Image: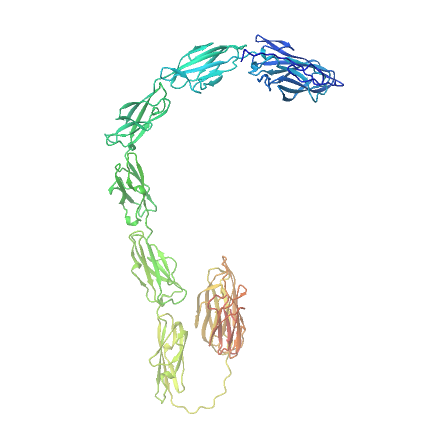
Amino acid sequence: MRGQRKLSVLLTLVVFGCSVAALAAGGTSARVWTAATGPTITASNHEGQRKINGALDGYTNGDVFTYAEGDTIAFRFALAADGAASGNFQVRFTTNDPSGCLFFLGDSFSLGSIDNNSGVSPTVTLVSTATDADETVVTLHADFSDAGSATINYTLTLSLNAGDCSGSSQHSRLANAPSDGGDFGNIGAQNVPVPANKVLVLPNITVNKLVDRGNGSFVPAFAGEYCFTLDSATTQCTDVNGSTVFQNVSPDGNHTITESQNAGFTFDHGTGTNCTFSGETATAAVAAGRPATGATCTFYNRLLAAPSVTVNKVCSAKAATTDRFAVVLNASPTGDVLDCGGNAQVDPTPGQAYTITEAGAGTPAADLANYSIDYSPGCSGTLINGQTTICTITNTLRAAPVVHVTKVCATDKAAPSDLFQVKLDNNNVGTALDCNGTLDVHPAAGADYSITEGAAGTTDLNNYEAPDYSTDCTGSLAHFGDSASCTITNTRKADPVLTIRKLCPGGKAATGDRFQAKLNGQNAGDPLDCGGSLAAHPGVGTAYSVTEGAAGTTDLANYETPTFDQGCSGTFTHFGDTATCTVTNTLKARPKLTVIKHVINDNGGTAQAASFIITVTGSSPDPKSFPGSETGTAVTMLPGAYSVAEQSPSGYTSSLSAGCSGTLAHFGDTATCTVTNNDVPPSPPPPPPPPPPPAPKIDLAITKVAAPEPVTLGDNLTYTEIVRNNGPDTATNVVVTDSLPSEVTFVSVSATKGSCTGTNAIICMLGTMLKGESISITIVVKPTRIGSITNTAVVAGSQAETNTANNRASVTSTVVGPFTPPSVCYVLTVRPQSLTVGKRTIVKVTIRERGKPVSRVVVVLRGKGIDVRGRTNAAGLVRFTVKPGRPGILQVLVPTHKTCRRQAIGVLGAFTPPVTG
């Protein structure tokens, strides 16, 4: 214990490498020192500074005293060299004292100034710090650049427990380094004693805390309950005994101790040893020494009165006169029930958090959802003994329930002045709303409500879809302050739609026939094909009427008067109305020629009407050839020119009525032809027949031009062909064939004589042409591709040609305009290009698509007396063996696919016409 320690310190100089006295208390044995050669460093005069009565005194190599624990002690020694030299040496001081205490702090060595004495001063640096037994060893390095000497200063610091060490062997000493000594000479015994028994012990201050917790007696404070601060710097708290000790207090003299305040308690009084009190502040008088003079201070605190809260009830108004309000403390009712303006006192637990709320009371109990409730700051918190506060609970009655109604029009209104009347439970509320208008509706609290609408202004709700009501357009608002949003959305129905349908029960007169629907005299949409339909939009409230006009290739004379059903006229009264108008065009019957055969046998003849074979020439006559009939034979055909001829038995004359030739221009046209045959008296035997005349010869020539040049894509291109018979004889059965190129679509064809049929391969039957006679043919097409288009026409007759070079004419046109993707078509190659009447010939037709052969394609050869078909093989080839019996044009057709060029073969009895297409 302090005051009973025996201290003795022996400063010992240990020199490694030379013989010296053994260290006190069993020091290490000495070793032989080998002196350095050359310049030498000498260490001498190792001293420590004394402190007497608290004041620093001179340096000594004897006992260093009197220092207190924690003090720092200054030391010095001299280094001298007789030339340039360097080496390591050590400072060794007591750290871990053998008595079991810490003397000098091991890391407290601090190298101070180097004060020159003569010559040059050395450079001294710290090499390392280590521990050896009870010593800390600091290795230093000294370096002289030349001869000189200096005083080296350093300090060490005593631990706060240095006074507890026993004996007087504590020290600081110089020593040679065991290695890397360099030029150092023998340092010798240079110990500076620092006796532990002369170190002053620092005093302690003990602080006790006693507390009266409300029962009139003082007991020790709990661990950590109170804390104390020494000299406004160091704070420590009570231990389990209600005490704390400030150790090693310095400097000597008075020190203040203050305490932390524990909520709910107050300082009562204080007592102590070497301790006085001024209010809650204690002053302790202490001094270091052997022994030290300490102090004890005891603080007494007592508990304050219990806390309380005054609860005041404030109301703006009440939802019901019976509403009352129960006071609730920490979720438990206190038993206090307040009316507006009332108050009560609540006692929360000291030091614990509390919350004061309220609950509905009265009969029936108040529904707090009808109020907004405000709690003042005093309605929650923590109160300790001695504290009071006020809790004011303010109830403000909420606004009446409200539904915010918004009118939304998803589309335009049917009429600008349309308005919508909001209804609450089927009763009108407020003014009628326009689109995007709003209105607040106030149903009763707790009652079911339903918000709907009715028409207002010019509104006819039939013009709108059924209103869409959002979820909250029906429901119940239970409390004051509740609100909801009701959105009523009206969507105007679509514009009235009139669907116009086109029906053609008997088909069309021509593939290009179209019908233009007209709404109130104005074209409605694109022309309709049979079976087509379109949607028209008459206005609401306006009468409408549907008619039609011709379009495309339509000639309405070919059709019966169109019928319009009841939906084709009327008035739409509302948006969203619909109707269907069906316009029916019935194709008239095919033109009909009635051929009557009348036979007169007044000269002994016996022939009957059926004895005469009658032939009708025209556009697809049916039947084409038939026996005569007194009652008449009905022949139907397509519109166009026709003529009647017969093969009459000998012995009869023949006469044809005016109706036996002419033109049936339209479907539905009719004519009657009467062919009369009268027998003649027998004639004498005929004279020998004259020699047959020479076969007639002809020279048919054709020329062809196209306009305009160039032509714009999509515009009309007109081909004009002039056919002339240069003689010398009359040409019969003159036929012109023009296979239109695939790059055009057919528009129209006309001729100054004869008739023309077809839309791709056009055949014009010109009949008989006298020598020198000319006939003009006009063909109108529309180009479908840009680039060059070549069109070829061929003319042929029944007689032998004197010049075949002019039987064919071609013209090339340039089409300009936007690019149109090329059509995918079959390319036909036909060999040979001409046939001879009566000669059996093999015709080879090859079909390719994009350069590759196409197999299994049906190919048809059709002409006068020839109608055969075949299918291509894997090489795209089909062969036909034909023997034409009459001159004319033989068409090469692919019924199932478009061909890039139309092909035809000329068949003549006296020459080989060129191939067209």
Side (left or right) of 333 relative to 787: left
The total number of labels drawn is 0
Name of the residue lying farthest toward the right: 38
Q: Looking at the image, which is closer to me, 863 or 722? A: 863
In the image, is residue 294 above or below residue 361? above
Q: Position of residue 114 (x, y in %)?
A: 66, 15
Depth order, front residue of 886/203: 203
**Residue most toward the front?**
26
Q: Quadrant of residue 372?
A: top left
Q: How has the structure been colored for display?
A: rainbow
Question: Residue 395 appears in which quarter of the rendering?
Answer: top left
Quadrant of res 176:
top right
Along the viewing direction, whichever of 244 and 879 lies nearer the viewer: 244
Q: Position of residue 550 (x, y in %)?
A: 37, 63
**Res. 447 in view:** yes
Residue 410 at x, y = what percent?
34, 46
Residue in front for this viewpoint, 99 or 672: 99
Determine whether 898 is above or below 688 in the image: above
Q: Point out residue 600 in the picture as x, y percentages from the top left corner.
A: 35, 85
Residue 724 seen in this snapshot: no
The answer to whether 841 is drawn above or below residue 352 in the figure is below
Q: Residue furthest bottom?
A: 684
